[in-house]
Image (tube, grey):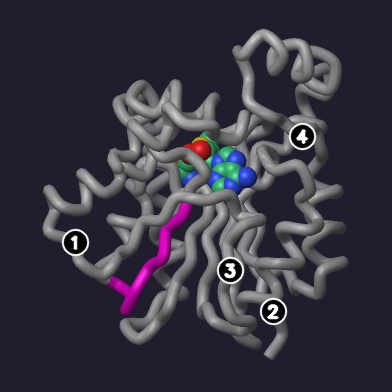
Amino acid sequence: MSAMEQTAMTVHPTARFWDRIAERYAKKPVADEAAYQKKLQITRDYFRPDMEVLEFGCGTGSTALVHAPFVKHILATDISANMIEIAERKAKAGNVTNVDFRRGGFDELEAADSRYDVVLGLSILHLLADRDEAISKVHRLLKPGGVFVSSTPCIGDSMAFFKFIGPIGRVLGLLPLLRVFTVTDLKTSLIGAGFEIEHEWQPGKRKGVFIVARKPA
Ligand SMILES: C[S@@+](CC[C@H](N)C(=O)[O-])C[C@H]1O[C@@H](n2cnc3c(N)ncnc32)[C@H](O)[C@@H]1O
């Protein structure tokens, strides 16, 4: 069954939103190329050729495919079948063989504890119903000493009014599920789960915060 046929069946409401915009999302240029390149480089400095990496909310797979040559294997997952279909197309076109794309919500992902060296969650934590649950799961899936690399719009700091218009936009199908929290809230969640924050960078006031957090060895 193709991803498009799966999409026609009953799908998670969140997946429906992202399925609908997947082709447009794939064509959209990166908003801040310099910041994106810097985040790629910082992330790459953590990679070793024998590493197992997980990315959740991978979208159309661009970041996983760029990182692929620097690690052993990447499992990249996303709730949207259409995003995954585009990602697989790109992997095939680029002859990338060490990235497996898999459709599924992060809460559904089954993996052994301490399985991964690095977990990537880029522009995704604000889209999850329960970020604390997700962060705890990341902590559990990481090896001791492993790192969680995240980039997260914390709109509670600059656009807290989204708390009110977000749910309306969602009912109208214009917005996905969107959680409003601050950088401080996010750091509190990470530290509460047992992470140590190793690197923090916010390219601008209204830009997502890039955090590398380590699970102590
Ligand atoms: C803003 S996009 C970010 C995509 C990619 N990480 C990037 O940085 O370009 C958010 C992605 O998260 C996915 N997503 C949303 N909720 C999810 C969930 N609960 N589990 C897994 N993926 C989810 C969406 O389908 C979408 O592809």
x, y (%) of residue 47? 41, 76
**What whole-number distance in Å separates the C-alpha atoms at marks 1 and 4?**
34 Å
| In contact (CB < 8 Å): disc 1 and disc 4 | no
Tag 4 or tag 2, which sits nearer the N-term?
4
Residue beneath disc 4: 179
Q: Marks 3 and 4: which is nearer the front?
A: 3
Q: Quadrant of the C terminus?
A: bottom right
| In contact (CB < 8 Å): disc 1 and disc 2 | no
Tag 2 or tag 1, which sits nearer the N-term?
1
**What whole-number distance in Å separates the C-alpha atoms at marks 1 and 3?**
24 Å
Residue beneath disc 2: 215
Tag 4 or tag 1, which sits nearer the N-term?
1
Q: Is residue 168 visible?
A: yes
Q: Measured along the vertical axis of the image, is residue 138 above or below residue 131?
A: below
> Disc 2 residue type?
Lys
Mark seen at residue 96: 1
x, y (%) of residue 148? 60, 67
184 relative to 208 in the view: left or right? right
Which structural element holds mark 3?
Answer: loop
**What whole-number distance in Å separates the C-alpha atoms at marks 3 and 4?**
24 Å
Locate residue 72: give its quadrant.
bottom left
Which residue is painted at 40% across and 81% down in the image?
51
